[in-house]
Amino acid sequence: MFGSMMDRPLLISALIEHAARQFGETEVVSRETHGALHRYTYRDAAVRSRRLAGALGGLGITYGTRVATLAWNNHRHLEAYFAVSGSGAVLHTCNPRLHPEQLAYILNDAEDVALLFDPSFLPLVEAIAPHCPKILNYVLLADRAHMPDTTRLSGLMCYEDLLAESVDQYVWPEFDERAASALCYTSGTTGNPKGVLYSHRSTVLQSFALSLPDTLSLSAHECVLPIVPMFHVNAWGIPYAAAMNGSKLVLPGPMLDGASLYQLIEGEAVTCCAGVPTVWLGLVQHMEAADLTLSTLKRTVIGGAAISKTLIRTLSERFGVEVRHAWGMTETSPLGTQGCLLPKHIGLSADEQCAQRAKQGRAVFGVEMRVVDAQSNELPRDGKSAGELMVRGPWIAAGYFNARQSVLRDGWFPTGDIATIDSDGYMQITDRLKDVIKSGGEWISSIDLENAIAGHPAVMMAAVIGARHPKWDERPVMFLVTKPGQALDKSEVVGYLRGKVAKWWLPDEVVFLDALPMGATGKVQKTELRRDYADMLCLSA
Amino acid sequence: MFGSMMDRPLLISALIEHAARQFGETEVVSRETHGALHRYTYRDAAVRSRRLAGALGGLGITYGTRVATLAWNNHRHLEAYFAVSGSGAVLHTCNPRLHPEQLAYILNDAEDVALLFDPSFLPLVEAIAPHCPKILNYVLLADRAHMPDTTRLSGLMCYEDLLAESVDQYVWPEFDERAASALCYTSGTTGNPKGVLYSHRSTVLQSFALSLPDTLSLSAHECVLPIVPMFHVNAWGIPYAAAMNGSKLVLPGPMLDGASLYQLIEGEAVTCCAGVPTVWLGLVQHMEAADLTLSTLKRTVIGGAAISKTLIRTLSERFGVEVRHAWGMTETSPLGTQGCLLPKHIGLSADEQCAQRAKQGRAVFGVEMRVVDAQSNELPRDGKSAGELMVRGPWIAAGYFNARQSVLRDGWFPTGDIATIDSDGYMQITDRLKDVIKSGGEWISSIDLENAIAGHPAVMMAAVIGARHPKWDERPVMFLVTKPGQALDKSEVVGYLRGKVAKWWLPDEVVFLDALPMGATGKVQKTELRRDYADMLCLSA
């Protein structure tokens, strides 16, 4: 027997309409590509989103059609978020840092018929256009004044002209909430990128979970700055959640250096942020160098990669910013866990609290987690038993775009992470399935080693990789980048690690580099290290 | 085209399992009917809920079967919330304050096959049992020690025995999230009570909206006390939302007098509450009489009836409790609006802020609102145009239990309230469609008159009713209850109102009573006043 409730779908268009009706005067501030700040309100954003939706219809873009974007975090990209999905089409956010060949691959794989892009990507788009025959419409996210005099793109359209010529009375269509809303490709470390196809349902449900007090705690009294790019898992869903709660939204554009972010946070009175660890390192370095403080920022969600205790303590103790470690992936929309402390942790020492915060956090309502052994048997939630992390929930992927078969195992999504879960639900990733170092039949966690050395004052970044070894099968080799003006040698590194990790975990080799190869989403690319240092990763007994 | 997300249903069983896994040690404290406090954890509650679900299955209760409860806010009622709905059956919460005949009517209308009830209701249940032939199982919510020596109920079962004999490894079933979860009858002012049938989907979605920072703001760091009864619109959904967020839950049992509530709030360090205005009046009177203060309570949601500015100011200015006025009804699950101030109100004077808080609040995400004229045309959101309030959303009723036809108008639920909506989305109820006084072609708001006189220091309660009048069609008559030891006469009342309301709004008659007839849900029953004072409500020119 069904309930007697209304059968109303959860749609993305309702988010911007809610913001316009309930928070019409609340500001959306965004950094234009050329540096200036643009200000308007949710009411303005709704009007322009409707006009864009109307214009897309005029271009023959209909329900289910893929529309690609190559854009920074700015107000026009925000309008595309609501207009493309709201109209029933699918928003395909592309990562401009991908190799042009990979970019052309995903544009063709997604069968995008239109591409909306920021002026800074014009050369890139001109270069890949010949390889993307299915793209019929190129739209430059700019006004008439910023259109190029000449371009190799035939029929390049001006975004502001499109809006000006569009209808004013567009009405959002209603459809099944399971309809596809957005498409994001994983920067797969192996093989071609795979597309994750989000739905209106998964997006709205995740927005609720993201907004809860113990997650990001979004309200009309908060000002949120998504540093995480809008081309990367929908900026973790923040643009949607901000509209749901009427939070002031600040979009940083392309300038993610410490100085620009600091100026934006202080200038707009930002109260909460979200970004990957590397961005925070840059911000902290800038603030420490210039001896600056933060006057409004209360908390930040950090995810996308493991975060060091040093960064957590620096942010909380020196800058008064609460770090909430979150875990997720493209396939989880991405919100999987939140790292807000429990009441029983409030009395703990700074050290103990930091240890809790360094864990990947606890599953938010809507996401179920378990760790399993190689035979898919669930392992105890004892904080010790490590196994592959499996997740399940309404905003977790069941499969990939254009892929026929499900990727689920017993109805659960296999994350490829090795993790433990404790009795409070705290999940802690010990390694990636593919990065864990198998030495003498035992496992060595590359991440634990990286975190251990990250505490050294002279260390900026570290990556540990398993090197083939005739006797032990694999042994750890550590790649290190020291801070500017700092130097280290192998004996100092090993000496620092001794006592912090098991003796047999100590790296056999330490390689010092000027920089580590970073991926498009700000993660160290161990695959490149494995390729570039193949010979060094082949040890002798 | 659909997204590639998992097709996972939103189920109530997931709420208690989430609480058990992520907040296993968090306390649930409840006042037993005989006065003692009972304490256990969400982990305990989950174990016992599973055992109850197993026991219900043993009684032959299956998917869609209705199970009734007659119980106060206590831990066994909480277990029934999760066990009955979680097992796929329908939880029918009955209001013990209903007239026995009405109670028998709804038990028969719902076709309940089981009734779980608190010991204090044994005489009531014995009295109605002969009129409820469909009820096959009577379960007393007590342990063996509290079972009666003799009872007219044949085969009365002991709740604790049922649990003790039940299985330990119950696994919650999975089914369509639109499945009915709970049934609540509206204490209809006209005709027989009508049943609103909630679904798992509507319940979980409302829990998200209720938990957001600007609504009740529930987190693992809050301790919430639902004073609103669990037999009244599921205690506004707080038991579900508390489990979703791991908030400490305090259930007050039958003792809702000011002294008991105060002792519970201070004793358990309650941080947020929810209840109807009358309950708050009692608490404030107790605290003022004993010159007490509140040390942990931060905010309360008040709804169910219009709330006076006096109460708002007393709670905020004298006791430091933020009042968040919410509006809803049984048909809206009930969350429709929240009254959290906007950032632009922070700078306002106490008077101006109070004026904002006295409004019914702003639609939460998921609920759409509009006011329409008699021809169903939408009226402007200008804060002036008054019309019938229409609502729409996934947790709004489309119809009633056992009623074939939908009650919607153009897809919207007609609330029967007369309201305005302003440009910020603030909704303000000016009257009930049936209570508004039509005088000389104009409308007089009975509620505005009641609120105006509520400010008088000698007034405890007031109700204004339209009396038939040969010349003006209708004219206002005011029924007043003065505070203990206080006295008033008509001229003082009219004198106090003069200047506060339009001259032609001044009541023609003022009737002083020792008490006003209160309904089972703490609302003044104007129908009884109309019946008992029929002659007095027929004025002459």
Image (cartoon, coloured by chain):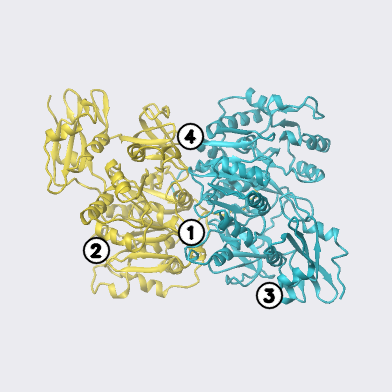
Chain colours: A cyan, B yellow
Q: Could you tell me residue A246's position as x and y percent?
A: 50, 40
Q: Chain of mark 4?
A: A
Q: Are marks 4 and 3 in contact (CB under 8 Å)?
A: no
* In-front residue for pair B160/B134: B160
* In-front residue for pair A136/A175: A136
Badge 4 is on which residue? A21
**Amino acid marked by disc 3:** Gly
Q: Are marks 2 and 3 in contact (CB under 8 Å)?
A: no
* In-front residue for pair B116/B143: B143
- Tag 4 and tag 3 share a subunit: yes
Badge 1 is on which residue? B15
Q: Could you tell me residue A405's position as x and y percent?
A: 71, 54
Give the label, 2 or 4, closer to the camera.
4
Badge 3 is on which residue? A499
Q: Are marks 4 and 1 in contact (CB under 8 Å)?
A: no
Give the label, 4 or 1, closer to the camera.
4
Alpha-carbon distance for marks 4 and 1?
Answer: 31 Å
**Amino acid marked by disc 1:** Leu
Badge 2 is on which residue? B126
Q: Chain of mark 1?
A: B
Q: Chain of mark 2?
A: B
**Up-down relation of residue A244 to residue B83 (above or below):** above
Q: Could you tell me residue A284's position as x and y percent?
A: 64, 52
